[in-house]
Image (cartoon, grey):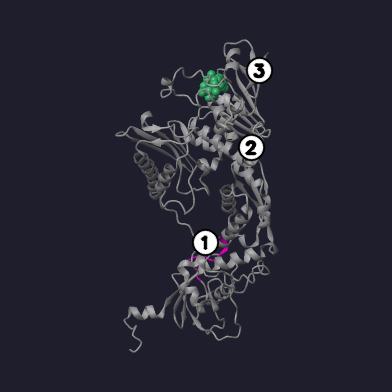
Amino acid sequence: MAIIKQLPLDQAYKIAAGEVIERPANIVKELIENSLDAGATHVKIMIVDGGKELIRIIDNGSGMDEEDARLCFNKHATSKITSIDDLDSVATFGFRGEALASVAAVAHVTLVTKHTLATHGTKVVVEHNAIISQEIVAASQGTDISVANLFYALPARKKFLKKKETEWRQILLLFQAFCFDYPAIHFQLHADGKIVHNCPSVTNLQDRITQLLNHEVGTHMLAVEHVNHQYTCSIDGIISRHDFHRYDSSGIFFFVNNRWVKNHSLMSALMKGYHNVLPHGKYPLCALMITVQQHDVDINIHPRKEEVKFIHPRIIEQLIQDSVRMALEARLSQEVNVPVRLVHSAPSNSYNRILSTERLLEESLRISSIAQEPFASIKAAPSYEAPLSIFNSSAYIQSLPKQSSLPDRTIVMHENQAPDYQIIGQYHKTYIVIEKEDGLFFVDQHAAHERILYENFKIRFKESAHIQLLFPQIIALSSGDLGLIEQHMDLLSDNNILVESFGAQQLRVTATPIHLQSVPLDDLIKQIIGWLRMHEHDDQDQLLKIHEKIHAHMACKAAIKAGDVLSKEHMMQLLRDLDKTRSNFCCPHGRPTGWLLPLSEIEKKFKRDYRSS
Ligand code: ADP
Ligand code: MG
């Protein structure tokens, strides 16, 4: 008996449509493109439950007459081409007559539309790809299409939809891309009945950034413009300046011949343009429009045309890298020419950063006696009592290059043991130099303090307290970022950062952790948003990972820095604390905290390595 069965056609079609339509954002994209193809100048997008429950797009385009309102749901129905030969030259979007048919196969669709020349509108309701009602209605010119209950008949597909927030983020990114791509169009975005973005038509991208993010961000942008005449390609758009960065790559948009694309090599070319300009792990903001000749790019390598392949990828990458670098350099040289204003910096407050983790909790408000003596000079070395078991471990030294394979060690304090080291002093305001029997030991003061604080935060954070701010700090955020952080208020309050939303694009910080009093919090909060986004797809341990990162970040901010002058008492305290800390061989970012220059090495250098001499 034959085991192959022919699927009923409508089911086969549903499955095929499900292959093209993976998530709500795919539908939103097709529908907005249809609106733009229809010549709309105002497009309103309404989303409920991340698009899973409802996607509704209202435009003021040409609309459709009674007959087209029915025909548009047919497979391979399009007003845009009549034969395969038109395919390459067509300037509009879409899977060519597939979009509405596919959408109608996987969701309930209601279309209300009125053609420019018609006296009345038409309403069509479609379910399971069949028109179940059509009536004449009063309507204003344009098209209003609602797509409800996505994948209602494809439970297997429905299961694969991500949580509301994830689907919503995809839509928000898409919306931003359309806003950059079509500055002349008035776009509006609503979510669950609330308006999220209202972006009337503008004449430049700077204004778009201001509409989408906030005014401050708009002032950090630079224009980029460059043409390669030899290869007839060009780039223009805006990028963020050297003095601005983001914590993830979600603010980077590339367009090729007016089509939003995701392309890894374009991104790395951009980052090369920013080489040495941005801190490690930080990203710029940009909207870059690349124009190439139609035959120099293949847009059909992806079913939804989200990716492209260039015939001469190197040329395009070089174009991006050079134009970005040039724009940044031009800006920097402008700044250098500005007369320098002398600023008297406030004395370093490094000593107000709490040094001893033992005292972290009980003494955070009472400034220690050491702290009151901020510029204590290094006195002649007395003999120091604290033995440093950490330095006795030869395994520690030898294992440094492959630190990650080392198990955490709990260091035991030997209170009454005789000291076996001497602090020589501080070198380069960065390293504590210690004389030991078997060599010179260098401790990186920042890395060491960072590790101490980090371990302490991990264990005892909940016991510590927050300080109510006299003047709450206002942090400007995009509404997308605000929405994301609002879902994770616990994450902040667990770390003693108390916030409340303040308007549609601002967060107000009302209390901060005791040890972060002097640290600006917007950096941390924006970083947390970046992490939330980065770990969005890790269902397990997401929060745990972020907690760890928050602790590492706080430790880094609160720790003494390279360049802070330390008194001998401070150095001693630091070494004692380090000795008591688990995993004391490297900082939370993996840099070593200390390193031994063995005596034997020194002797070798001086050709004394034959002990007899
Ligand atoms: P395609 O866009 O490739 O033609 P679609 O399935 O997306 O295929 O749309 C089918 C047809 O329906 C379009 O060619 C267009 O004539 C009509 N149509 C769809 N959406 C709109 C709209 N918002 N306004 C006017 N006409 C539309
Ligand atoms: Mg279309």
Which quadrant is home to the N terminus?
Answer: top right
Q: Real-space Cα distance between discs 3 and 1?
A: 60 Å
Rendered location of residue 411, percent (x, y):
58, 75
Q: Label 2: how many residues lie within 10 Å, few (<14), some (14-19) or many (20+)?
A: few
Give the quadrant of residue 459.
bottom right
Is 120 above or below relative to 260? above
Taking the view exactly as shown, the residue that stands out farthest to the left is: 230
Is residue 14 at all visible to an observer of this figure? yes
Is 143 above or below relative to 350? above
Query: Which SS does the magenta portion mostly show?
Result: loop
- Determine if the C-beta at disc 2 is less than 8 A from ligand 1: no
Marks 3 and 1: CB-CB under 8 Å? Answer: no
Which quadrant is home to the C terminus?
Answer: bottom left
Rendered location of residue 5, percent (x, y):
59, 29
Left or right of 103 in this view: 293: left
Q: Nearer the viewer, residue 240 or 20?
A: 20
Q: In the rendering, which numbered label is found on residue 589?
A: 1
Q: Which residue is mark 3?
A: 123
The residue depicted at 45 percent of the width and 51 percent of the height is: 278
Q: Real-space Cα distance between discs 2 and 1?
A: 41 Å
- Determine if the C-beta at disc 3 is less than 8 A from ligand 1: no
Is 367 above or below relative to 208? below
Instruction: Select label 3 or label 2 by which is in front.
Output: 2
The residue type indicated by label 1 comes to: His
Q: Earlier in the sequence, mark 2 or mark 1?
A: 2
Q: Which residue is mark 2?
A: 156
Residue extent of the magenta highlight: 557-565
The residue depicted at 49 percent of the width and 75 percent of the height is: 395
